[in-house]
Amino acid sequence: MDSGWQKSTFSGNEQSNDCVEVAVIGDALALRESDTPAAVVRTTPPALGALIRALKAGARPG
């Protein structure tokens, strides 16, 4: 399953460059931090898109 994980090119090529990785698993997107790969968060493309749009717009939790 690890072969499907992608990381940002902004993370660099070194093994010590921790980053968020993403993979497509069925109809879901899976996200994980590279230094803790066992902790995986799953979401849908529309939900992740909504989160990204809200963050770009400056939305704050509350």
Image (cartoon, rainbow, N blue to C red):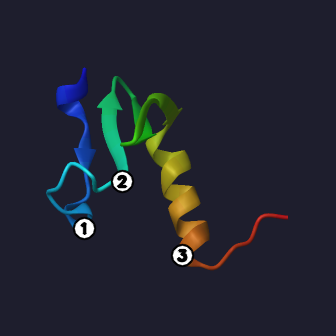
Image point 69% across, 73% down: which residue?
59
* Among the two numbered marks 2 and 1 on one chain, the one whose residue lies closer to the N terminus: 1
Q: Earlier in the sequence, mark 3 or mark 1?
A: 1
Q: Mark 3 and mark 1: span between their CA atoms?
A: 18 Å
Residue at (50%, 30%) from the top-left corner? 39
**Which tag is nearer the camera, tag 3 or tag 1?**
1
Which residue ends up furthest to the front in the rendered image?
16
Lateral position of residue 5 relative to residue 20, left or right: left
Q: Are marks 2 and 1 in contact (CB under 8 Å)?
A: yes
Badge 2 element: loop
* Screen quadrant of the N terminus: top left
Quadrant for the C terminus, please. bottom right
Dot label at residue 56: 3
**Type of the residue with mark 2:** Cys
Tell me the CA gap for discs 2 and 1.
9 Å
Disc sitting over residue 19 in the figure: 2
In percent of width and height, residue 57 lies at 60, 78
Q: Mark 3 against mark 2, which lies toward the viewer?
A: 2
Please provide percent x and percent y for residue 17.
Answer: 28, 56
Residue type, mark 1 in image: Phe
Q: Which residue is mark 1?
A: 10
Q: Is residue 60 above or below residue 8?
A: below
Q: Nearer the viewer, residue 41 or 50?
A: 41
Describe residue 36's horizontal placement relative to residue 14 as left or right.
Answer: right
Q: Could you tell me which residue is drawn at 50 percent across and 50 percent down?
A: 48
Label 3, label 2: how far apart the Cα atoms are: 19 Å
Q: Nearer the viewer, residue 12 or 26?
A: 12
Vertical relation: 18 (above or below) 30: below
In percent of width and height, residue 51 lies at: 57, 58
Q: Identity of the amino acid at label 3?
A: Lys
Q: How many residues crowd around disc 1 within 10 Å: few (fewer than 14), some, or many (20 or more)? A: few
Secondary structure under tag 1 reads: helix
